[in-house]
Image (spheres, grey):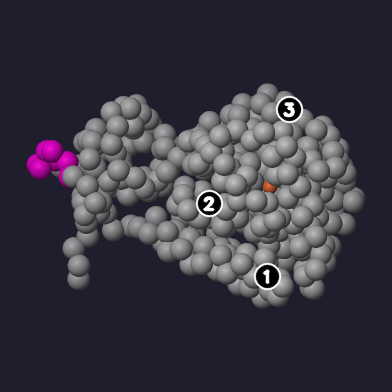
Amino acid sequence: MTKSTLLEIDKNEACLGMFIHGFGKQWLSSPFALSQFKLNSPAELKALRESSVGTLVIDLSKGVGPANAASAIRKPYHNLPLDTGAAAMAQATGMVRSLFSNAASPAGIDRQQVDAVVDVVDRLVYTRPTTILNLTKLKTKDETSFQHSIAVCALVGLFARHLKLEAKLIRILCASALLHDIGKLRIPTAILAKKGMLTGDEIAVMQTHPRKGYEILARVTGLPDMVGKVCLQHHEKLDGSGYPTGFKQDEIGAAARIVAICDVFDALTSVRPYKAGSTPQAAAAMMATWDGHFDKMLLERFFDCLGLEGPGKGMVTNGSAQTADDTLGLSQADLDDFQF
Ligand SMILES: [Fe+2]
């Protein structure tokens, strides 16, 4: 049996040069957008010490150990939720890379491949919800778009279960989340990967991705209508200021409203070429102030789902055993969306 190189230590034992492997179940308290990285800056060390994180897991094979060899707090770390999450992310990333590459070819999207990825992600969401939350932080810089799709799929699966939606609907929502940004395949890489601010013309090109995605999905046989509709509507806002159409309120399907929340949350908490990631708490605080953007009732339920605190202002409080129609405030048209 190989000796574990992972050690759980008190945050006050952290020092520069340590490789942080994770924060266990305290990931939401982490002040960092990434869960695995080398602690190289005094500012990061200060942020860690001032955070509400109690302990962290370090990897001795990738960085220095604690200075105090006699510490009684540190102990070998054998509970490895991040490893499980990383393995799932690696497997799913490979599958999504293949799925997206087929989507760009004349062969198009294979419905069975979509199901297979949803299986991998959804099974983990179902069996290890705490682990799957780490997917939002387990991204590598070179495969951001694939991993964003997977993370949104996982968040939607988790959120949909929290909303007590039917299993069949959860799977369709997950497939919708997985494919919501498929239209970005048709956006030039120079725009997608640009590090600086986009110009007005570039923004206009970028904003064509929902329609381009809808066109791609419309050619796939056997895909529920919801998948294309979510792709088309995921950047619409309730006040009509979204794109590509400027739909308002009930014109935006409930499925698209659910995916929009998870999409933005993952985008805010992710590291991108042009920005550092926000903490989950900071992302939640930001989203709660964007009046007119999200469905506030759903947003509050999303915060409940992740154990995050919304500001409460203008929000509804959460009940526990409500049904879909009285919980979500869905219109009949929205509910019709959910019938397949
Ligand atoms: Fe998008």
What is the quadrant of the N terminus in the image? bottom left
Above or below, 42 relative to 323: above
Please give the residue where the numbered disc 2 appears in the rendered image: 144
Magenta stretch mostly in which secondary structure?
loop
**Is 43 left, or right, of 323 in this rendering?**
left
Q: Position of residue 130 (x, y in %)?
A: 48, 52
Q: Nearer the viewer, mark 3 or mark 2?
A: 2
**Is 248 left, or right, of 216 in this rendering?**
right
Task: Give SS at disc 1.
Answer: loop
Name the image quarter holding residue 295: top right
Name the image quarter holding residue 107: bottom right
Please give the residue where the numbered disc 3 appears in the rendered image: 291
Please give the residue where the numbered disc 1 appears in the rendered image: 105
Using the image as rendered, state which of residue 147 and residue 103 is in the foreground: 103
Above or below, 310 relative to 228: above
Q: Earlier in the sequence, mark 1 or mark 2?
A: 1
Using the image as rendered, state which of residue 252 and residue 54 is in the foreground: 252
Task: Give SS at disc 3.
Answer: loop
- Start-end of magenta stretch: 65-71
Using the image as rendered, state which of residue 25 and residue 265 is in the foreground: 265
Q: Is residue 3 something that shows in the picture? A: yes
